[in-house]
Image: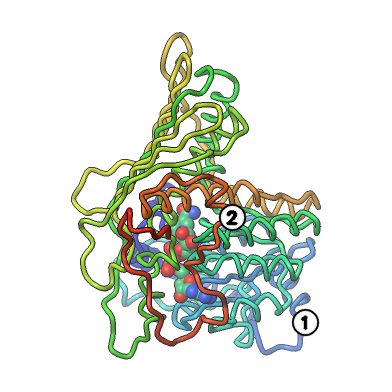
Amino acid sequence: MNDPRPHADHLRPDERDALLSRRRFVQTSAALAAVPIIGGGALSATAAAQEATGSTLPPLKVGLVGCGGRGTGAALQALRADEGAVLHALADVFEPKLDRSLRNISNGLWPKEEETDDEEEKPEKPIHPRCQVTPERKFVGFDAYQRLIDSGVDVVLLATPPGFRPWHLTAAIDAGKHVFCEKPMATDGPGVRMVLEAAKRAKEKSLSLMSGFCWRYHHAKRATMAEIENGRIGDLRTIYTTYNTGPLGRHDRKPEWSDWEFQLRNWQHFDHLSGDHLVEQAVHSLDKMMWVAWVMNGEVPDRVTGVGGRIAREGESSGNIYDHFALTYEFPSGVRGFHMSRQIPNCANDNSDLFIGAFGQAYMDWNRHEITGGSNQWRYDGRGKDMYQQEHDELFAAIRSGKPHNDGEWMANSTLCAIMGRMAAYSGRVITWQEALESEESIMPGPQEWGWHDFATNPVPIPGRGKVS
Ligand SMILES: NC(=O)c1ccc[n+]([C@@H]2O[C@H](COP(=O)([O-])OP(=O)(O)OC[C@H]3O[C@@H](n4cnc5c(N)ncnc54)[C@H](O)[C@@H]3O)[C@@H](O)[C@H]2O)c1
């Protein structure tokens, strides 16, 4: 079903919180009366799951690692995608976020009712029966992901800051779990290699691995790509992608916070956790560059040159990342891909893509998808499902059908495309695909260094000074 309301996943964290709390609806007594009390009974988890869904399908137990805005949305979409799915376990480093996420997932499962502005009249709804997260399956801490994976889940949703992803993904695949993996998949070259390895093992084990590069599941963008592939713009010549927007939310340091806590609460602004805004956010645009280059020519870029800097980020909580990038990717066929991104407030925003071909050009943004030039005019005017729901519908259909879905290689490649762009801008050098892929520069430390202690971050890089990441 199409949800015409603004989608929480593309809002800043503070906007998302406000939106989610506005969407709490009043319960009806009828709905309440129908709810069995979950937890504490003698039923096995599987029997409880079957009872909760009332479905004849064998239950699929879903576990969410990273209970923030996107993870909460993904869990809801997973449960809506499959009538036999139940939420089995949650993992986060901050317990309040886990509890809030459980409440929001549960609220989202209840039938929608009239919205009211009167907060006083909103009694809390009970936890929905398909949320089977018993207290012993609420995992908190840096090792929470592993305990969740070991708790009997079938499907793991990974939605922490991306720095952790290579380890979380590897652990889930090694344990034989199907995975939904938010983008980006890593923040450095060594992380991308781990993801590629995990993707290979997922294939060997017939596990499904779905990426969170959601635009690949967007009906209008899929239709546009199909037109391009069918020759409507002719041979691909040039790609422009733009992601200019404002900065994401920040939290001032509290005296009791360690460095790790401070960085985690501001993770979008630190290179080891987010990869920089190029890798964390504008990677969506680079993914579309990679998509069209692959569809048309079956290629990834050879090399990239770029500039970037940090002109408007101020204060400790703005971390150590840049706020603008301009990059030129060169593909083996001679196609060039130009990318610009900015996270600076009070400037013109733009999130669009332009693919220029031999006799036409395709333009896409949030609402407009059209091809112009010559006699090949085309415009998308269909409607489709929410792209985030589409991802989960396809993931669960693949799991149920026993025909595994695997986005592993291209999702790792799109992540690497962004990482190599960052390396080029930070260093001031030309960076080849091979150099990025084989890079030994780890900016994200491994699990032995995850904890609530102090952790010094990299200084803001200055091009030409010899440092690559
Ligand atoms: N596909 C999209 O359109 C889209 C949109 C938004 C976010 N995202 C991606 O989703 C991911 C999460 O983003 P978000 O906006 O939900 O962020 P968020 O800050 O709202 O949520 C992240 C959650 O992970 C938790 N966390 C941090 N480190 C953890 C660890 N080591 N183990 C367990 N939990 C941990 C945090 O406490 C927090 O609850 C990011 O990779 C982001 O790029 C994708």
Question: For residue 242, what is the image quadrant?
Answer: top left
Where does residue 121 sit, x and y in percent of width and height?
Answer: 35, 75
Question: For residue 223, what is the image quadrant?
Answer: top right
Residue tagged by mark 1?
A: 44
**Which residue lies most toward the top here?**
375
96 or 226: nearer the eye? 226
- The amino acid at mark 2 is Glu
- Look at the picture and state if 228 lies above or below 81: above
Residue at image point 47% right, 67% down: 443
Residue tagged by mark 2?
A: 438
Where does residue 205 sit, x and y in percent of width and height?
Answer: 80, 59
Q: Is residue 264 left or right of residue 83?
A: left
- Dot in front, 2 or 1: 2
Question: Is disc 2 in contact with disc 1, using a CB cutoff of under 8 Å?
Answer: no
Question: For residue 269, what is the image quadrant?
Answer: bottom left
- Look at the picture and state if 316 lies above or below 157: below
For label 2, the SS is: helix
Q: Is mark 1 within 8 Å of ligand 1?
A: no
Quadrant assignment for the C terminus:
bottom left
- The amino acid at mark 1 is Ser
- Look at the picture and state if 407 lies above or below 170: above
